[in-house]
C-alpha cells in the first residue's frame, strides 16, 4: 500500500458526504494503491450510512472508535493504516483534484527527511461580517496560507490537522497522537495541540516540515465558529497548550503563576471593557485576555 488517508469524523454526516464525494474525484497516480480510512468516533447520526454509499466509489476502510476524542480516532486510523505515506485530513474539506498526486510526488522526492503540508482556504457558511474578528481566530477558522513558494517552515509554524502528511515509519517512531490532547466532546473544556505535539516530535527525530503551496484544500467553516466566543475559547485552549514557555524564566510568582502574567491578564481584561464602553474595537484585547486566562488555569490546575 502506497498511501493511507486518515479521516476522523463525529456526527457530521452532511459535510462528510460532500467530502467523500470530492475524494471520489481525486486524480490517483498511475500504479499507486491507496486507502481512505474513516474513523467513526461513536457518531449517533447517519455517518455509517453515508460512508456505505461510497464503498463502490472509494477504497474506504470504515472503523468504529468508541473512545471519545479526535486523537483516539486518529490513532485508530494509524493502527489500521497500511500505506507508506500517511495523509491527515478532516470530514469537512474539499481537496484540490491533484491532492493525492502532489503529496505522493513530494514523498518520492525525499521519503526520509521531510513531512509536508499545504494551504487551507476557508469556505465560510455565511459571508463574514467582521474580518478583523476572523483574523483573530485559529487557522481552522481564518485558514492557513504561507504564500506561493515551497519552503521549510520556521520555528513555531505548523500545519493543521485538515491538510498534512508524513512518512508512516516516522509516525511509528514517535508514537502517534497524544490522546490527552485534542478536541474531545466528552470533556467540558476545549483542549487542542495534538498536531503541534506530534509535529514537534517528528522534528525532534530530524524531519523538517515542508510547505507545498499546490497541495491545497477548502475547509468548511460553519457560522457557529465565526463567533467571538468560539474564537476566544480556542485562544484560551491555546494558552493551556502553550503554557510551558511562560514558566521557563519566571522567578516571581503569585499562587504559582508568574506575576507578569497576572498583570497582563488584568490589563487586557480592563482594556477590553473600557474599549467596549467607548465603542472602540475591543475584541483583540478580549481574545488576548482569554489566552492568558488559559495559561493561568492550566498552571493552577497543575
Image: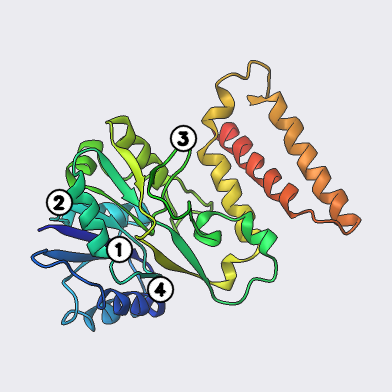
Question: Which of the two marks, 2 or 3, is nearer to us in this view?
Answer: 3
| Label ID, residue 155 | 3
Horizontal arrangement in the rendering, residue 96 relative to residue 136 (left or right): left
Query: Mark 4 — residue?
Result: 12
Q: Is residue 107 visible?
A: yes
Location of the N terminus (image quadrant): bottom left
Find residue 43 and report its horizontal and vertical position in percent. Answer: 35, 70
Q: Secondary structure at mark 2?
A: loop
Q: Is residue 45 visible?
A: no
Instruction: State how far apart marks 2 and 4 are (Cα).
Output: 28 Å
* Image mark count: 4
Up the image or down, 289 lies above or below 164; here it is above
Looking at marks 2 and 4 on the same chain, the residue that comes earlier in the sequence is marked by 4
Task: Provide the residue designation for mark 2.
Answer: 84
Alpha carbon of mark 3 to alpha carbon of mark 1: how far? Answer: 27 Å
- How far apart marks 2 and 3 lie (CA) works out to 27 Å
Q: Position of residue 181 (x, y in %)?
A: 41, 45
In front: mark 4 or mark 3? Answer: 3
Q: How would you rate the neighbour count of disc 1 (Cα within 10 Å): few for under 14, some for 14-19, many for 20 or more?
A: many
As displayed, is residue 67 above or below residue 247? below
Amino acid at each position: 500500500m502506497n498511501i493511507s488517508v486518515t479521516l476522523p469524523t463525529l456526527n457530521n454526516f452532511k459535510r462528510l458526504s460532500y467530502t467523500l464525494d470530492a475524494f471520489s474525484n481525486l486524480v490517483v497516480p498511475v500504479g499507486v494503491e491507496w486507502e481512505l480510512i474513516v474513523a467513526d468516533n461513536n457518531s449517533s447520526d447517519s455517518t455509517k450510512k453515508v460512508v456505505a454509499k461510497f464503498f463502490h466509489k472509494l477504497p474506504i476502510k470504515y472503523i468504529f472508535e468508541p473512545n471519545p476524542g479526535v486523537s483516539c480516532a486518529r490513532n485508530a486510523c494509524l493502527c489500521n493504516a497500511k500505506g507508506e505515506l500517511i495523509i491527515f485530513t478532516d470530514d469537512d474539506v474539499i481537496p484540490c483534484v491533484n491532492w493525492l498526486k502532489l503529496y505522493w510526488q513530494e514523498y518520492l522526492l525525499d521519503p526520509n527527511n521531510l513531512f509536508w503540508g499545504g494551504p487551507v482556504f476557508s469556505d465560510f457558511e455565511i459571508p463574514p461580517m467582521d474580518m478583523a474578528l476572523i483574523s483573530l481566530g485559529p487557522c481552522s477558522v481564518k485558514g492557513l496560507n504561507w504564500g506561493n513558494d515551497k519552503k521549510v517552515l520556521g520555528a513555531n509554524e505548523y500545519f493543521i490537522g485538515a491538510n498534512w502528511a508524513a512518512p508512516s515509519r516516522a509516525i511509528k517512531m514517535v508514537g502517534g497522537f497524544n490522546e490527552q490532547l485534542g478536541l474531545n466532546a466528552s470533556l467540558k473544556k476545549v483542549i487542542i495541540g495534538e498536531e503541534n505535539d506530534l509535529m514537534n516530535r517528528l522534528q525532534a527525530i530530524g524531519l523538517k516540515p515542508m510547505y507545498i503551496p499546490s497541495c491545497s484544500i477548502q475547509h468548511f467553516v460553519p457560522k457557529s465558529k465565526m463567533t467571538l466566543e468560539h474564537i476566544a475559547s480556542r485562544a484560551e485552549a491555546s494558552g493551556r497548550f502553550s503554557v510551558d514557555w511562560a514558566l521557563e524564566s519566571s522567578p516571581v510568582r503569585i499562587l504559582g503563576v508568574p506575576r507578569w502574567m497576572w498583570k497582563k491578564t488584568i490589563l487586557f481584561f480592563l482594556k477590553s471593557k473600557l474599549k467596549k464602553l467607548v465603542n472602540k474595537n475591543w475584541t483583540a484585547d478580549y481574545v488576548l485576555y482569554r489566552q492568558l486566562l488559559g495559561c493561568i488555569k492550566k498552571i493552577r490546575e497543575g
